[in-house]
Image (tube, rainbow, N blue to C red):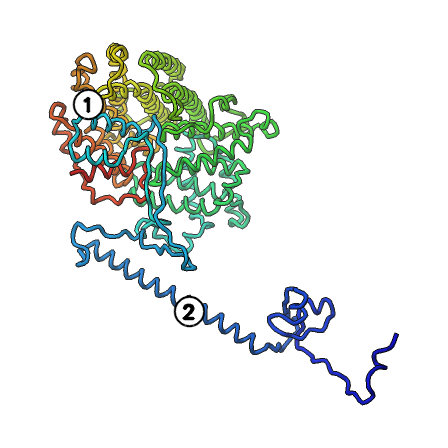
């Protein structure tokens, strides 16, 4: 082989290789000659390699080609232009905000009084960053089955409209909206709605960080408050272990903490804040403060909840579902609950075999968490009118039990802890009867079954009443149900914590039991409403209904009146009584539901040809109760927008169907004032109060002519 050097002409000058200040990484690795072109050298371009220049740590001068610098300058210029455009947009939005504040106190010349002012939630630019996608209104849909308040209220409205007794303006509005088609709700909303600034927490800086934790004294106070309230009603979080973890994290200055545990801590703080006894703090401030904790928890565990691989995540989701019931995002509770159930099944919380691998304390905690899922599942199935996520056949574990290693005396008295467990088990057994009611009388809220006959309904109601009677007889003395007479006679505050919690558990169990009996007998009331509303039943069916139905009407009315009496006397009673109620949104639900059942009863009882007998005595006895319910809601949680909306709905519905023959006592009603519709800003979602009613229905009432 010839040597290349020998082939050169003797007269040729040697070719000098151009040296480059810095070769690219691929060329240096291959020990190839790099021409130093940027952003990609010729060799890397030919071979299709990624070209990267990494200066050595000892380099003092780096030669960069002019075209590369020009490219960088162009990119910086583009960024500056983008930043300027953003600043201009923010300036424009600021002007609109200022204009909104001005309009709140006066009237813009372009918007005369009475004209609709665009909500700031709608000022969001609906064109994406590329300027190519135009977002339009989105539609939310929701099914609210037979057991829901939405379905019952629309059923009642349909009967009243069909009978021709409803005032013309409201009837026309109802018919135009089609508000009673199977309890199905459609609502349009703007794209990506935002909360208004005055609805957000005003906290800034460190408090908005998802990793922020309140000062230790404040945190411990909220934790102890939680385990003295919600943690006793739903004892699926082991208090000593939770507190021990908190103290360990605090000693380490939260340098080593699991995101899921920190998220659970924030949900504990959120529940403790939002369930604070009404009257102890302003409702808006309390809800805003709890929302800060909720947002932190969501930010910490937003991705973890999609995996749901730990017990902490299930407990986090359970608390979040409970919390959302007490917010203006209550419809989201259904979605969160679905995640909780799937995570629980994924972990095998329902399985006795799966739990054998764990210690006795962990087994008991898993079992209690599973039953927490079951209880919440039954509650949401009833309130939303949707099929339960956990069939009764999946609930096979033994009831929660005390264990020597589960010592909570450092947090709560042993007697109170034992009473809490008995209350939890009594609730589980009561909600098993709720499953039976939803199954036999409401078709599991599937919306597929034909309505059972009168004889079938009455026989099923009677059988379930026997089960409820057996349940009540099995309660220990410390949990026996109360009545309004016993409550009024209890003038002295309980002398011990255990005695106080006994009263609290008895009160909550009583309200749950009464509400369940209302739910049990409501199908009979619905059959009467159908008959009064022009749906001609079979003559034999009507005869059976007239013979067997009035007794159910009386039971339904008695239970509804007892609910209203208990809530009314508690909210207008001494301070210690106000602490007997559970979370305010459950008291709101029971009272709201009871009031509408009585209004439905009033309307049915006016037609003796349908009832088959005079119900005047019952009507006279119940006459003042709708107004009594309104007065109770007025005092339940002052300034709470959720309570106020439900009260307004009740006031206007009562006014719409009122009749001089059952006009309420004017003295009581004089304490209640109708709130003008302009005082409320309705959600663009239209379904935020799905457990109570649809916003569209309320607007139909408020905007009637």
Q: Residue at x 39, y 47 (%)?
A: 292
Label 2: which secondary element: helix
Badge 2 density bin: few <14, some 14–19, many ≥20, Cα 10 Å: few
Q: Residue at x 19, y 24 (%)?
A: 163
Q: In this view of the protein, which residue sits in the foreground, 252 or 291? A: 291
Of pointers 1 and 2, the one earlier in the residue sequence: 2
Q: Residue furthest bottom?
A: 11
State the CA–CA distance, disc 1 to disc 2: 67 Å
Up the image or down, 672 lies above or below 194; here it is above
Q: Which residue is mark 1?
A: 603
Q: Residue at x 51, y 21 (%)?
A: 396
Up the image or down, 612 lies above or below 341; here it is above
Q: Is residue 401 visible?
A: no
Are the residues tagged 1 and 2 within 8 Å (C-beta)? no
Q: Quadrant of residue 52?
A: bottom right
Location of the N terminus (image quadrant):
bottom right
Label 1: which secondary element: helix
Q: Which residue is mark 2?
A: 81
Location of the C terminus (image quadrant):
top left
Q: Position of residue 518 (x, y in %)?
A: 30, 21
Horizontal side of 542 relative to 45 (left or right) equals left
Residue 393's disc number:
none
Q: Is residue 252 visible?
A: yes
Q: Quadrant of residue 532?
A: top left
Up the image or down, 108 lies above or below 626; here it is below
Badge 1 density bin: few <14, some 14–19, many ≥20, Cα 10 Å: many
Q: In this view of the protein, which residue sits in the foreground, 8 or 646? A: 8
Q: Position of residue 534 (x, y in %)?
A: 22, 21
Q: Position of residue 625 (x, y in %)?
A: 20, 25
Q: Position of residue 13 (x, y in %)?
A: 77, 87
Horizontal side of 286 relative to 295 (left or right) equals left
């Amino acid at each position: 082989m010839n040597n290349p050097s020998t082939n050169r002409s003797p007269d040729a000058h040697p070719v000098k290789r151009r040296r480059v200040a810095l070769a690219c990484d691929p060329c240096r690795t291959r020990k190839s000659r790099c021409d130093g072109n940027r952003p990609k050298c010729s060799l890397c371009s030919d071979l299709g390699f990624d070209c990267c220049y990494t200066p050595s740590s000892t380099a003092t001068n780096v030669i960069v080609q002019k075209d590369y610098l020009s490219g960088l300058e162009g990119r910086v210029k583009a960024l500056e232009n983008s930043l300027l455009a953003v600043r201009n947009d923010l300036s424009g939005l600021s002007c609109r905000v200022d204009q909104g504040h001005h309009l709140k106190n006066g009237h813009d010349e372009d918007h005369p009084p009475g004209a609709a002012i665009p909500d700031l939630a709608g000022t969001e630019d609906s064109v994406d960053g590329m300027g190519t996608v135009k977002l339009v209104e989105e539609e939310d849909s929701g099914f609210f089955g037979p057991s829901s308040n939405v379905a019952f209220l629309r059923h009642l409205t349909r009967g009243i409209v069909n009978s021709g007794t409803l005032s013309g303006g409201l009837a026309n509005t109802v018919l135009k909206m089609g508000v009673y088609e199977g309890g199905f709700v459609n609502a349009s909303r703007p794209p990506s709605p935002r909360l208004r600034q005055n609805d957000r927490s005003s906290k800034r800086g460190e408090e908005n960080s998802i990793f922020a934790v309140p000062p230790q004294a404040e945190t411990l106070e909220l934790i102890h408050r939680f385990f003295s309230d919600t943690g006793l009603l739903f004892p699926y979080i082991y208090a000593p272990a939770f507190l021990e973890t908190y103290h360990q994290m605090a000693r380490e200055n939260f340098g080593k903490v699991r995101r899921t545990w920190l998220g659970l801590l924030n949900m504990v703080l959120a529940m403790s804040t939002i369930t604070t006894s009404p009257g102890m703090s302003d409702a808006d401030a309390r809800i805003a403060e709890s929302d800060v904790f909720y947002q932190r928890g969501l930010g910490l565990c937003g991705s973890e909840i999609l995996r749901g691989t730990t017990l902490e995540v299930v407990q986090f989701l359970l608390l979040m579902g409970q919390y959302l019931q007490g917010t203006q995002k209550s419809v989201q509770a259904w979605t969160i609950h679905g995640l909780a159930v799937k995570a629980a099944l994924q972990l095998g919380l329902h399985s006795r075999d799966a739990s054998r691998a764990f210690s006795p304390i962990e087994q008991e905690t898993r079992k209690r968490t599973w039953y927490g899922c079951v209880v919440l599942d039954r509650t949401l199935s009833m309130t939303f009118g949707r099929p339960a996520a956990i069939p009764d056949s999946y609930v096979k574990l033994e009831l929660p039990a005390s264990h020597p290693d589960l010592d909570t005396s450092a947090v709560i008295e042993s007697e109170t802890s034992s009473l809490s467990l008995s209350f939890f088990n009594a609730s589980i057994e009561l909600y098993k009867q709720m499953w039976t009611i939803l199954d036999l009388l409401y078709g599991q809220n599937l919306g597929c079954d034909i309505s059972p006959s009168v004889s079938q309904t009455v026989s099923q109601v009677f059988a379930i009443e026997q089960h409820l009677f057996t349940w009540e007889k099995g309660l220990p003395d410390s949990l026996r149900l109360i009545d309004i007479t016993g409550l009024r006679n209890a003038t002295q505050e309980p002398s011990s914590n255990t005695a106080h919690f006994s009263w609290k558990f008895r009160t909550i169990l009583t309200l749950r039991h009464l509400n369940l009996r209302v739910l049990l007998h409501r199908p009979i009331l619905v059959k009467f409403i159908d008959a009064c509303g022009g749906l001609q039943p079979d003559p034999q069916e009507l005869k059976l209904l007239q013979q067997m139905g009035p007794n159910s009407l009386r039971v339904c009315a008695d239970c509804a009146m007892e609910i209203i009496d208990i809530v009314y006397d508690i909210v207008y009673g001494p301070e210690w009584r106000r602490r007997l109620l559970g979370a305010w949104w459950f008291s709101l639900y029971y009272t709201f539901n009871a009031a509408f059942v009585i209004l439905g009863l009033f309307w049915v009882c006016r037609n003796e040809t349908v009832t088959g007998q005079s119900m005047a005595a019952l009507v006279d006895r119940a006459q003042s109760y709708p107004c009594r319910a309104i007065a109770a809601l007025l005092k339940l949680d002052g300034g709470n927008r959720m309570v106020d909306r439900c009260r307004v709905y009740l006031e206007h519905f009562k006014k719409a169907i009122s009749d001089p023959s059952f006009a309420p006592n004017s003295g009581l009603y004089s304490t209640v004032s109708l709130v003008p519709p302009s005082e409320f800003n309705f959600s663009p979602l239209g379904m935020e109060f799905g457990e109570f009613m649809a916003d569209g229905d309320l607007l139909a009432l408020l905007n009637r002519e």
